[in-house]
């Protein structure tokens, strides 16, 4: 997909850019030459066409701001291209592998299946492509300028960005460039360069079929390897999680080789190394922390006025919905005058699409004890085999934990792993955010027969 | 064991204990006399406060067992009576009630089996080479389901034993507010005296059976129905004849179509052959052979769930609908559910009422029905006819008249107060058999537990029946909590509510290229103030798992802004609820695009 980079500084500019005629080329050339000295002005300039940037840009445009989005690659960012979306497609693929094991137990006969990596890859890529196009048309519909190219901050006194030799500025510039997978160096882990990252996994890699076939690696491991979520080890360290998930988590990468060399993971052909995602763009006068994340306050302000940052580039809560919400809140603050519009970073629900998935919101048990004292924390747990497995030879547990605080037993944390936990968590996150107590959980009538009902029937 | 058995010798121990029972020897002299004596003695016992049991629960289903176990935990002496009358087809089952044996559990497992059938089709799109579409073996599935159900039956027995609850496989009957007579299969009676009685006998499927009425009764019926003529419907019971409703599950909508016609009995007969040749949800889960080509009569949630999983495992299924699908649910959502089923192979015949079922020499069943608007008769042959035309409370054998327990004339259900008490002190009723209670397992369980705590004197909390969430496990699952849009409109007027909605595409549908036009979310909120949520409705995969947490939120008084202020979980279906931003009255396109 090519995006013709054109500015719409003048009123007539909107009409330019579709038919490639001789006069258009002349015009384009003329503009290019002119733009070397001229600066195109917007109300809102967004660097990075990912979840957060696009959400902020669209909301700003809705509120009447003249907005542009600069993106050097495909629209949609990590989430759509190399993150949530292709990840979950692969996760669903692996879920089908689980189902295939269960078909006979449920009465289906004669389903002997093989896996074809190319099929799912082409379907997945087609879907991602479709999303890219949807994003483009969303921008077009909202009359947001799409600027294709790599943005670099200039040394001008006024914050200015250079893309393909052209200069753009705005009173409000948002950095939402996201992150990339960290690469483990060979000196840290010998042989690390033989691995690929999540970007490679989801993008053009074609040598994985060996890996996903059952005899090399049970399919449930392969897609479990994600999530640079720092509080997860705490959750996992409770003896509730089966070992293959721990292999999947791979948060502290130094222990990864050891884990892999274990007989849990017999000689993988390809190992996914997924750790963290430091930012790429380095704007002038904007403070960064030691890990090169941009320092932004709760209102997404950086240390330089007029420049804002959100999403993965800030290194906090690396999640699409967080970036989307932050982008929208910022747009409301800047262009609707809602001074206190900011994202609440507490109680952000997260699902790790391992097999089975993990859902977590709020404080872990250890965090709650640290914050409130051991005597004020009450833990409710349950473990059961979901009814789905009543029929199957293959079994998997569902584990749940409520972290409650104080005499009124306010639920400050909810953690679970099991089939369906991915879809279960959202509603509970609303309730935890509202300050629900254990008594509120108890008073809620269950939905039978589900796994989620166990959360409101814990004793 | 301290059971009073009239025909047996009296042990001195009991005589000493029940000091008011000094002329109990007379018990041997016949049931009538016996009952009278019991009545006298109940007065005496009332003063002495001595009973064999603290609580006797009649009905070992979800509610009854929960109540019994909870009460026993608080040190009460409890007995449970459970007895399953075989269905007309002869199906019977063990302890645990409808949910475990012929309801929630087997239906969800079979639903799951059907979902796996759908997953097989998707698997190919996900890169799995499925060489040929596998066939489904009913016997394998039903055996696995039945074995699991039997393990649950056993589990309930063990739990009762562990908690020292006495279990009797007896059919319970009241003589007064403190005495229950249990009858076993061979008619032998056992008498239990108790401080409190809890009736939790549940309900059973209705059949459209023939009930012969005298001319006088017919005229009385005519008088009654001529007042309300066309509002007579499936759910409308025979007002002046609750006992008919109870005994025969009589269905007025089928007997009297046009009450102004003098010969309405001849013109609109009941359904001959319905009982002999038909089955109900009591039978379907226990069939050893595949039901084959099936006609489901009725589009209640029971009917749709059965039709859904039968279609899903590859059977030819037709649903005969008289007027509405999923009566009582939000009708927009009901429309989406049936539309989805329709597009996945379940055939719907609307505005049809069945007339007769005949067995052909080939063994298949020929069903005749009438298209109500044109009065045209149509017929087709099926292997199985499944009646899903509603459920009737099980009260007939309880001898409630004698005990003075009042029934609701309209529904035949037991009239109860907010604390589950009937018109007779110390007699309580809960679950499907009690009037105005949701016919669902979880509220019954909770109501049973709370009742047990009140009876044990450890709590005064009464069950709150508002905002009960529920899920319909049709192929496209539908879950809801709170008010339907129509109810909300009625209660708060058109201008009082704001409905936010979205048509979303589940990610799992995208790659599988499944049509997602019925995946829909609707939040019915108050329009003013902080926009408190009145009702939430969701169709899509895992609807039950999605809704539970939101039901908790609604119980806590969640508002629209609470939804908006919660960060989504990406990519899930549930997150779409936190992204609702198009109001229905804005008229804008509610289709979700992008992340």
Image: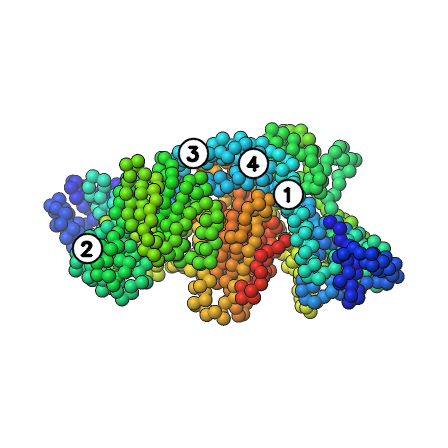
Disc 2/disc 3 C-alpha distance (Å): 45 Å
Reading the image, the residue beneath label 2 is: B213
Host chain of mark 4: A
**Image check: B385 left or right of B586?**
left
Reading the image, the residue beneath label 3 is: B137
Host chain of mark 1: A
Q: Nearer the viewer, residue A287 or A174?
A: A174
Indicate the quadrant where residue B159 lies: top left
The quadrant in which the N terminus of chain B is found is top left
Q: Please provide percent x and percent y for residue B570.
A: 61, 50
Q: Please provide percent x and percent y for residue B272.
A: 25, 47
Label 3 crowd bin: few (<14), some (14–19), many (20+), radius 10 Å: some
Q: Earlier in the sequence, mark 2 or mark 3?
A: 3
Mark number displayed over residue A124: 1
Mark number displayed over residue A97: 4
Tag in front: 3 or 4: 3
Q: Nearer the viewer, residue B159 or B130?
A: B130
Tag in front: 2 or 4: 2
- Callout 1 touching callout 3 (CB < 8 Å): no
Q: Under tag 1, what secondary structure? A: helix
**Image check: A269 left or right of B321?**
right
Host chain of mark 2: B
In this orientation, does residue B531 appear? no
């Amino acid at each position: 997909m090519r995006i013709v980079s054109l500015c719409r500084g003048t009123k007539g500019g909107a009409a330019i850019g579709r038919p490639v005629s001789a006069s258009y080329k002349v015009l384009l050339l003329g503009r290019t030459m002119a733009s070397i000295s001229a600066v195109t002005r917007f109300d809102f300039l967004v660097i990075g066409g990912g979840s957060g940037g696009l959400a902020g840009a669209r909301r700003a445009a809705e509120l009447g701001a003249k907005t542009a989005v600069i993106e050097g690659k495909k629209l949609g960012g990590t989430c759509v291209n190399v993150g949530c979306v292709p990840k979950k497609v692969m996760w669903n693929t692996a879920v089908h592998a689980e189902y295939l094991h269960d078909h006979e137990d449920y009465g289906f006969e004669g389903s002997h299946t093989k896996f074809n990596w190319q099929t799912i890859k082409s379907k997945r890529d087609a879907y991602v492509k479709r999303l890219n196009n949807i994003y483009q048309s969303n921008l077009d519909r909202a009359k947001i300028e799409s600027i294709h190219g790599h943005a670099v901050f200039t040394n001008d006194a006024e914050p200015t960005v250079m893309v393909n030799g052209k200069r753009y500025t705005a009173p409000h510039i948002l950095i939402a460039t996201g992150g990339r997978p960290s690469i483990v160096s060979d000196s840290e882990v010998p042989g690390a360069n033989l691995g690929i990252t999540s970007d490679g996994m989801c993008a053009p890699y074609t040598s994985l079929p060996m890996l996903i076939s059952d005899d090399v690696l049970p399919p449930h491991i392969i897609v479990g390897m994600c999530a640079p979520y720092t509080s997860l080890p705490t959750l996992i360290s409770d003896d509730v999680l089966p070992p293959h998930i721990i292999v999947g988590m791979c948060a502290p990468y130094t222990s990864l080789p050891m884990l892999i060399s274990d007989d849990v993971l017999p000689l993988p052909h390809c190992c996914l190394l997924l750790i963290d995602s430091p930012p790429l763009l380095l704007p002038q006068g904007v403070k960064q922390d030691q890990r090169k994340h941009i320092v932004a306050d709760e209102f997404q302000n950086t240390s330089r006025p007029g420049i804002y940052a959100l999403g993965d580039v800030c290194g906090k809560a690396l999640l699409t919905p967080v970036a989307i919400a932050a982008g929208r809140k910022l747009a409301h603050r800047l262009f609707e005058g809602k001074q206190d519009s900011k994202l609440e970073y507490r109680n952000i629900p997260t699902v790790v699409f391992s097999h089975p998935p993990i859902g977590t919101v709020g404080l872990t048990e250890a965090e709650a004890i640290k914050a409130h004292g051991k005597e004020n924390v009450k833990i409710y747990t349950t473990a059961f085999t979901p009814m789905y497995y009543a029929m199957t030879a293959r079994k998997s547990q569902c584990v749940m934990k409520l972290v409650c605080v104080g005499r009124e037993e306010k639920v400050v944390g909810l953690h679970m792993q099991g089939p369906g936990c991915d879809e279960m968590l959202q509603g509970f996150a609303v309730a935890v955010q509202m300050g629900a107590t254990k008594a509120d959980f108890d008073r809620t009538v269950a939905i039978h027969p589900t796994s989620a009902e166990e959360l409101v029937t814990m004793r | 064991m301290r059971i009073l058995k009239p025909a047996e010798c009296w042990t001195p121990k009991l005589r000493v204990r029940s000091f008011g029972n000094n002329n109990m020897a007379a018990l041997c002299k016949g049931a009538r006399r016996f009952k009278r004596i019991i009545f006298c003695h109940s007065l005496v016992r009332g003063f002495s406060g001595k009973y064999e049991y603290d609580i006797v629960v009649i009905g070992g289903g979800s509610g009854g067992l929960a109540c019994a176990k909870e009460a026993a935990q608080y040190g009460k002496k409890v007995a449970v009576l459970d007895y399953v009358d075989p269905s007309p087809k002869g199906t019977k089952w063990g302890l645990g009630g409808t949910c475990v044996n012929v309801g929630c559990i087997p239906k969800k497992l079979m639903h799951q089996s059907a979902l796996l059938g759908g997953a097989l089709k998707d698997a190919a799109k996900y890169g799995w080479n499925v060489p040929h579409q596998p066939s489904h073996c009913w016997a394998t599935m039903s055996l696995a389901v039945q074995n699991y159900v039997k393990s649950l039956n056993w589990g309930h027995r063990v739990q009762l034993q562990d908690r020292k609850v006495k279990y009797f496989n007896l059919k319970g009957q009241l003589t007064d507010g403190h005495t229950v007579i249990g009858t076993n299969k061979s008619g032998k009676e056992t008498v239990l005296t108790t401080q409190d009685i809890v009736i939790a006998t549940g309900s059973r499927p209705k059949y459209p059976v023939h009930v012969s009425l005298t001319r006088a009764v017919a005229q009385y019926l005519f008088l009654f129905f001529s007042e309300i003529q066309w509002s007579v419907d499936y759910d409308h019971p025979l007002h002046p004849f609750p006992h008919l409703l109870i005994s025969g599950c009589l269905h007025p909508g089928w007997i009297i179509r046009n009450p102004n016609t003098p010969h309405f009995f001849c013109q609109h007969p009941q359904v001959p052959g319905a009982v002999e040749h038909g089955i109900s949800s009591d039978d379907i889960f226990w069939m050893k052979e595949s039901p084959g080509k099936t006609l489901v009569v009725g589009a209640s949630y029971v009917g749709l769930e059965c039709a859904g999983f039968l279609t899903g495992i590859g059977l030819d299924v037709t649903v005969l609908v008289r007027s509405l699908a999923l009566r009582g649910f939000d009708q927009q959502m009901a429309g989406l559910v049936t539309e989805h089923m329709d597009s996945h192979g379940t055939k719907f015949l609307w505005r049809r009422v069945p007339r007769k079922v005949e067995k052909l020499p080939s063994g298949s069943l020929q069903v005749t029905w009438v298209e109500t608007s044109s009065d045209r008769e149509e017929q087709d042959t099926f292997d199985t006819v499944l009646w899903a035309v509603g459920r009737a409370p099980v009260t007939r054998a309880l001898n409630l008249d004698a005990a003075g327990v009042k029934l609701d004339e309209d529904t035949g259900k037991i009239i109860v107060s907010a604390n589950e008490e009937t018109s007779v002190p110390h007699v309580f009723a809960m679950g499907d058999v009690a009037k105005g209670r949701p016919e669902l397992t979880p509220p019954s369980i909770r109501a049973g537990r709370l009742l047990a705590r009140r009876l044990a004197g450890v709590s005064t909390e009464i069950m709150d029946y508002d905002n009960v969430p529920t899920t319909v496990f049709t192929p496209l699952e539908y879950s809801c909590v709170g008010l339907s849009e129509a109810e909300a409109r009625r209660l708060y007027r058109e201008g009082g509510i704001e409905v936010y909605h979205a048509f979303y595409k589940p990610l799992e549908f995208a790659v599988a290229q499944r049509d997602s036009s019925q995946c829909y979310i609707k939040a019915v909120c108050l329009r003013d103030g902080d926009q408190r949520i009145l009702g939430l409705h969701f169709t899509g995969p895992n609807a039950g798992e999605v809704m539970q947490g939101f039901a908790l939120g609604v119980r806590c008084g969640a508002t629209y802004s609470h939804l908006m202020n919660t960060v989504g979980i990406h990519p899930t279906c549930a997150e779409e609820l936190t992204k609702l931003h198009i109001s229905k009255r804005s008229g804008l396109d509610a289709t979700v695009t992008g992340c």
